[in-house]
């Protein structure tokens, strides 16, 4: 951190908040509010005479509330930059700090928040994590029992720079404990709170245990665990060392911790799985290894940078294997525990990777984007003709579209990822997606349904998940009836309701719409846009007289080949259970209504031929009810 | 040694197809349930984790023939603590259902009905927390009578019915009226005169303690060591087993106060035993008040699963309050006269 502060090309804006982020890769505009320190940075020497003079003491957040800090202070001894700041929530404005500062004249009570506008090429999000609050687990007694502490508090108590200068004491009486229990997986690997494993707690618990054992050799230390996870280089050796030192490991998750009201000692009850017997340990102190959880402001950061979050709540990377430090927004990268719990080596590695990825952006004059982006036909866009619309804006997961009534919608090409959500949402065919135009999809559709369409299952698949699932079904040799005909688009958001209707108009027996599971969507919220759209379509099909069982929506991941095969098999069974005549009759009856709706395609030059193909038959059908 | 041939997957599927058994395979054997469960205090062999483990491996015979599957009282102390959110009592019920279908029988003990004494009034059928009692026709001495019958697959031997029965027709092994009365009077404790009769230095308190409300063996041992002239302990299967007649008997003899200790509402081992026990004591307190007896002579206390060694202080407080009330009565009595 000190090196970073001294680097001529690094500027640190500490005590600042990002308010707004606009723009796109290579051209971000970031609005930052620098909060007032009430201390002039250039004049502050970091000596701390002001803090010595300050009469106000409040709990020190860095020391987990175990020690006091002053109303004018630095966050901690190694803070960079080492500039004092006044906490106005607690300052009584006695001005003793002003006197103490003397000729340095660094204190300025008139400072105001300062707004900065930065132009940057790329952004790295490294906002870290929060620690799980164990008060929500009443059976562990954190809160009511003073001698139950969290691992972070233990970390401060056994740190030589901590409030006790590295002397471990019991909060209840200030005595040095002779026994300690460390409880693993508090709030993690627990369906009630967080399903995931925090990953690094095993190692820090072992580290703390070894540290304590070295400090107080006759201390009895017991670690209660469900599984010890020490998979990285050198970690297992460290674990072995702890066992050799006499640190006791109990394979069993404690059911509860109770306190002796007189001695304030704690009783930890757990089943030792090796013995198959329940143990009751009396210890003088308990430390809870709490889960790493996403920071409380993760959602706020995610929405200002259009990032997505994994089911666990941490920021989601673009691809878990191939692009682990990229975010879904080009030019924004992820580093450290903000992306998921990780230890120091992994955080450092990811930080370096993110810096290298960011440098790649900064050192390029041009940037290659996917060739499948969406484009607006300004002549067709109704917004340009003064109609309030903006449906496309709501369908873009990347905030790449802006739409002002009176002007055609604008798509920022560098922000578009080509999911096609806006294309499917536009009711006027004003947006097209290169390589996935309506005409291209309909052309495939008409070929696939050329022979005996009523015996076919037409499957729309997204590129990233369900198409992969279908592929997996094939490579895994899962058998399913040869009735499915697939059309691949980039995202389920690209699947236009009209494609489904067109399939029925062309006589399809069954239609499947498939995409990623909500948390796996490659385009942040593309799946959600599709899910909402097809929720509505169910009702429309009902009005058209199409049996509801002839249309199905399924979310299939790239690993679920078995599910794809099962869905197609089930759909084929459903198809077989409906009489052919009924399918033909339903399609015939719905055709006129569908055709009225699909009129918009006739205006598109690429579509004329495709739609004209069926024109004679169509008009004949329309004449029947008339005559 | 268990050979792999013993693993019967059809049993796993059968349990998981049974309502409540769906989450059988979610268990990763952390032991939280085993350490929470109180049944093991009375039967060290009982271990819910091992039952789930054996069932998950498909050890059909070992699971269905075990006595442990019948011992879970569905108190659900383990359920809110399970990190996999497995409703263990429901999995147990699913296994029990299969066992019942296959003709296995629970080992007991059970509540039993004295057919000659039962009047068929149905008070017990309403009191039972497990709906294990129902009335039905039975031939008694040549007559067909409608009397209570115990469903052995449902009875958890809490003793609530024994306390509820107005005819003395219900009984429970170890905890029938006669045995409890014998323990109350053990060592002639009840016959000695009390503090309110001016014959003892301190109030003499009889405490009925629910056997589940004290968690650890060490705590029990400490309590038993406190037994003296002024404290006598009688353990009950449940605070709902307490019979007001027993309390009145104790008060009419040498006890100055009777304390009934049960589990916290919501932590009762027998679903609503605490609720029933607390209700009985509250009603008795009111009646005693109307009869102008010294107030505070009967009391119900709840002990939480997370509080340790709370009972001695509660007994102490009761004792002091009896002294205070008696002193106040002694001061006001001459004025009244």
Image (tube, rainbow, N blue to C red):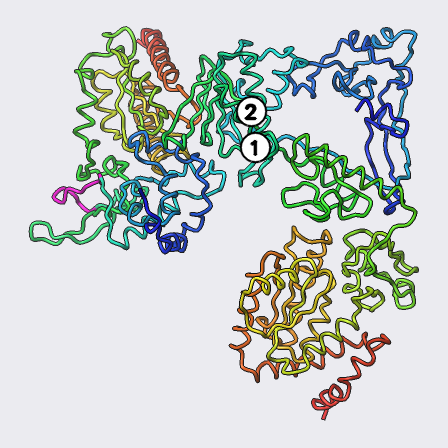
Circle 2 sits in a helix, a strand or a loop, which is it? helix
Residue drawn 92% across the image and 67% down it: A379
Residue lying farthest bottom?
A627
- x and y, in percent, of residue B58 in the image: 36, 50
For the point 35% across and 25% down, the residue is B214
B103 is higher (above) or lower (below) than A230: below
Q: Can you see residue A86?
A: yes
Q: What chain does badge 1 belong to?
A: A
Specify whether B296 is left or right of A110. left
- Where residue B150 sits in the image (x, y, percent)? 22, 46
Determine whether label 1 and label 2 are within 8 Å by CB.
yes
The residue beneath circle 2 is A206
Residue A542 visible in rendering: no
Percent position of residue A459, x then y: 65, 69
Q: Left or right of A61: which side holds A413?
A: right
For residue A571, which quarter of the picture?
A: bottom right
Name, please, the residue furthest toward the left.
Answer: B142
A24 or B212: nearer the viewer: A24
Position above or below: A610 against B27: below
Chain ID of residue with mark 2: A
Displayed quadrant of residue A57: top right
Residue denoted by label 1: A230
Q: Classify the position of the C terminus of chain A by image quarter.
A: bottom right
């Amino acid at each position: 951190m000190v090196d970073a502060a001294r680097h001529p090309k690094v500027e640190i804006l500490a005590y600042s908040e990002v308010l707004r982020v606009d723009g796109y890769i290579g051209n971000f505009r970031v609005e930052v509010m620098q909060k007032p320190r009430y201390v002039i940075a250039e004049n502050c020497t970091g000596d701390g005479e002001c803090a010595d003079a300050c009469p106000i003491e409040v709990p020190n957040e860095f020391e987990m509330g175990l020690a006091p800090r002053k109303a004018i202070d630095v966050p901690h001894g190694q803070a960079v930059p080492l500039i004092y700041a006044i906490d106005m929530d607690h300052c009584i404005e006695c001005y003793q700090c002003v006197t103490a500062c003397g000729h340095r004249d660094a204190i300025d009570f008139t400072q105001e928040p300062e707004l900065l506008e930065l132009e940057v090429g790329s952004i790295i999000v490294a906002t870290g994590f929060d620690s799980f609050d164990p008060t929500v687990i009443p059976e562990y007694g954190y809160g009511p029992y003073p001698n139950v502490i969290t691992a972070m508090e233990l970390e401060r108590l056994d740190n030589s720079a901590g409030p006790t200068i590295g002397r471990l004491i019991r909060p209840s009486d200030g005595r040095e404990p002779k026994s300690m229990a460390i409880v693993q997986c508090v709030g993690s690997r627990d369906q009630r709170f967080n399903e995931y494993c925090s990953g690094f707690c095993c190692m820090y618990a072992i580290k703390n245990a070894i540290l304590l054992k070295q400090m107080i050799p006759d201390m009895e230390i017991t670690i209660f665990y469900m599984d010890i996870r020490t998979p990285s280089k050198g970690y297992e050796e460290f674990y072995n060392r702890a066992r050799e030192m006499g640190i006791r490991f109990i394979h069993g998750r404690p059911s509860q911790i109770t306190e002796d009201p007189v001695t304030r000692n704690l009783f930890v009850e757990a089943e030792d799985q090796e013995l198959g017997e329940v143990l009751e340990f009396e210890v003088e102190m308990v430390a809870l290894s709490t889960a790493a959880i996403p920071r409380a402001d993760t959602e706020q950061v995610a929405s200002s940078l259009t990032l997505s979050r994994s089911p666990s709540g941490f920021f989601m990377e673009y691809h878990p294997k191939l692009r682990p430090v990229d975010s879904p927004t080009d030019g924004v990268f992820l580093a450290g525990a903000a992306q998921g719990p990780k230890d120091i080596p992994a955080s450092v590695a990811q930080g370096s990777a993110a810096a290298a990825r960011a440098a790649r952006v900064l050192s390029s004059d041009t940037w290659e984007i996917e060739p499948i982006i969406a484009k607006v036909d300004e002549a067709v866009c109704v917004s340009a003709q003064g109609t309030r619309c903006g449906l496309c804006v709501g369908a873009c997961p990347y905030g790449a579209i802006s739409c002002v009534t009176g002007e055609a919608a604008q798509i920022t090409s560098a922000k578009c990822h080509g999911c096609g959500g806006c294309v499917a949402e536009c009711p006027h065919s004003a947006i097209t997606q290169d390589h996935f135009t309506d005409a291209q999809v309909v052309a495939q559709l008409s070929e696939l349904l050329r022979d005996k369409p009523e015996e076919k299952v037409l499957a729309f698949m997204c590129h990233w998940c369900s198409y992969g699932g279908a592929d997996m079904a094939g490579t895994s040799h899962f058998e399913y009836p040869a009735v499915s005909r697939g059309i691949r688009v980039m995202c389920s958001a690209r699947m236009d309701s009209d494609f489904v209707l067109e399939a029925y108009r062309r006589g399809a027996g069954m239609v499947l719409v498939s995409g990623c599971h909500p948390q796996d969507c490659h385009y942040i919220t593309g799946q959600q846009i599709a899910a909402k759209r097809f929720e509505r379509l169910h009702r429309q099909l009902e009005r058209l007289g199409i049996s509801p069982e002839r249309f199905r929506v399924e979310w299939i991941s790239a690993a679920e080949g078995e599910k794809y095969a099962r869905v197609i098999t089930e759909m084929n069974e459903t198809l077989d259970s409906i009489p052919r005549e009924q399918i033909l009759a339903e399609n015939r009856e719905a055709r006129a209504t569908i055709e009225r709706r699909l009129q918009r395609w006739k205006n598109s030059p690429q579509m004329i031929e495709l739609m004209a193909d069926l024109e004679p038959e169509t008009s004949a059908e329309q004449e029947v009810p008339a005559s | 040694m268990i050979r792999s041939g013993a693993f019967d997957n059809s049993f796993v599927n059968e349990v998981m197809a049974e309502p409540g058994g769906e989450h059988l395979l979610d268990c990763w054997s952390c032991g939280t349930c085993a350490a929470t469960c109180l049944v093991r205090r009375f039967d060290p062999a009982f271990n819910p984790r091992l039952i789930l483990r054996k069932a998950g491996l498909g050890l059909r015979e070992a699971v269905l023939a075990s006595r442990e599957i019948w011992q879970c009282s569905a108190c659900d102390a383990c359920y809110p603590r399970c990190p996999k959110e497995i409703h263990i009592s429901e999995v147990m019920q699913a296994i029990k259902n299969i066992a019942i279908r296959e003709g296995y029988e629970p080992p007991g003990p059970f509540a039993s009905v004295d057919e000659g004494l039962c009047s068929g009034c149905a008070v017990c059928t309403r009191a039972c927390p497990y709906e294990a009692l129902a009335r039905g026709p039975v031939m008694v001495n040549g007559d067909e009578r409608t009397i209570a019958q115990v469903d052995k697959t449902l009875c958890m031997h809490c003793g609530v019915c024994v306390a509820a029965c107005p005819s003395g027709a219900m009984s429970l092994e170890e905890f029938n009226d006669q045995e409890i009365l014998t323990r109350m009077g053990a060592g002639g404790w009840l016959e000695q005169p009390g503090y309110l009769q001016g014959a003892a230095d301190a109030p003499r308190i009889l405490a009925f303690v629910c056997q589940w409300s004290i968690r650890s063996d060490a705590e029990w041992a400490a309590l038993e060591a406190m037994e003296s002239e002024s404290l006598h302990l009688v353990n009950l299967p449940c605070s709902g087993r307490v019979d007001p007649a027993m309390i009145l008997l104790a008060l009419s003899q040498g006890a100055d106060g009777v304390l009934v200790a049960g589990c916290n509402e919501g932590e009762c081992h027998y679903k609503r035993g605490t609720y029933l026990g607390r209700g009985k004591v509250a009603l008795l307190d009111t009646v005693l008040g109307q009869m102008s007896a010294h107030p505070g002579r009967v009391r119900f206390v709840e002990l939480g699963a997370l509080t340790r060694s709370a009972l001695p202080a509660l007994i102490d407080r009761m004792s002091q309050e009896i002294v205070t009330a008696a002193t106040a009565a002694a001061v006001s009595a001459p004025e009244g006269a």
